[in-house]
Amino acid sequence: MKRYLFLFPLLFILACSHHTDSKYPGYFSKNGKVFYKYSDLGNSHKLARKGDIMEIVLSYTKMNDSIFWDSHDNGFPFAIYLPYDTLNTGGSYQQILLSGNEGDSINFIVPAGGVFKNILHIRLPYFLHKDDMMKVNARISAIMDEGQYADKQRKIREYRKDMDLQEQLNLLQYATVNNIPNEAKQDNIYFMPETQGTGPEVTDHSLISIAYKGSFLNGRMFDSVSIIAPLQFRLGDTAQVITGLEIGIKRMREGEKAKIIIPSQLAFGENGSSTGIVPPYTSVIYEVTMLKVNNPGK
């Protein structure tokens, strides 16, 4: 409670001395370029010191609040790790994070050019220019010294191994309970034809049209494409589907229906899907209907 009481006079001082642009109500700025506000305060009074590493849950949004990148996209542990020195010498919003306590949530409005130059080291997304303003939402989930960080990384590695093993056990149990024969497994996927097709076979560069239903081993559906509005693409041109599904599709012919069971290594991997719908280390099932096959030269 004392920390909250202390915050009110602090915010008043900031409002008087650093608020430079009224078009961002509630935000403060020290240089007129980077704007920030605290949206939540943690219960800790722990600040980062030289040698520490910050664990930060991070998301980037456009000014209309639509998210275009989230640290959850990286999969477990859903955070990024930045050393004190990186933050201290960084530009844009990074240095301000060093004034935050463990557990704090800070929202920033910053020029997009500074964010991508200093954090991601990649080119700007096509929908942003370097001088465009964007929002960065950061929560300082932990502040660790080198020993704590090493221990955290060890636990993450162990957790990933456990998840990988548990997935293998779940998949084996599913195959056993559902009487799926061993010969159905080829190229690390289970392929089970359900309705025989009579049309052309799929080749490496076939232009195909498919309908499908994607579900987890427990039967819960996470994705579907209907016969009315099928997915159409040419195999090999672009990565339209996950690797395991493409392997299965290449065994089909027009008119065929098949069930394809795919482990995470050939599906959404150790990170899960970018949408967060499919968790890390999760086997998936696709029930596919091959509606049309047009082969090159035909």
Image: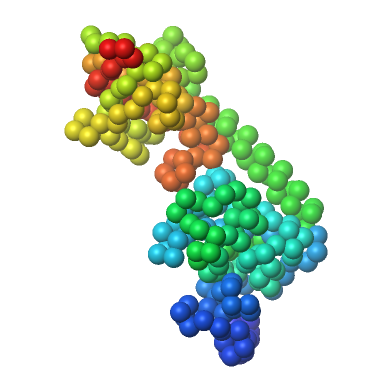
The x and y percentages for residue 146 are 79, 54
Residue 85: x %, y % from top left: 77, 60
Direction from residue 177 to residue 271 in the image, left or right = right
**Residue at 45% over, 14% down:** 185
Q: Is residue 212 visible?
A: no
Colour convention:
rainbow
Please give left or right for residue 183 compared with residue 151 in the image.
left
Q: Position of residue 158 (x, y in %)?
A: 67, 39
What residue is rendered at 47% in x and 60% in y?
A: 61
Q: Nearer the viewer, residue 246 or 174?
A: 246
Left or right relative to 266: residue 228: left
Farthest residue in the left direction?
A: 228
Q: Tell me which residue sits at (48%, 35%) in the image.
A: 268
Q: Quadrant of the N terminus?
A: bottom right
58 horizontally vs 215: left or right:
right
Can you give x and y, in whole percent of width and height, for residue 74 in the image? 56, 45
Query: Image quadrant for the C terminus?
Result: top left
Q: Residue at x 47, y 50 (%)?
A: 126
- Front-most of residues 150 and 170: 150
Query: Foreground residue, 37 or 76?
Result: 37
| Quarter of image, res 54 | bottom right
Q: Is residue 101 above or below residue 278?
A: below
The answer to whether any part of residue 118 appears in the image is yes
53 lies above or below 259: below
Q: How many marks?
A: 0
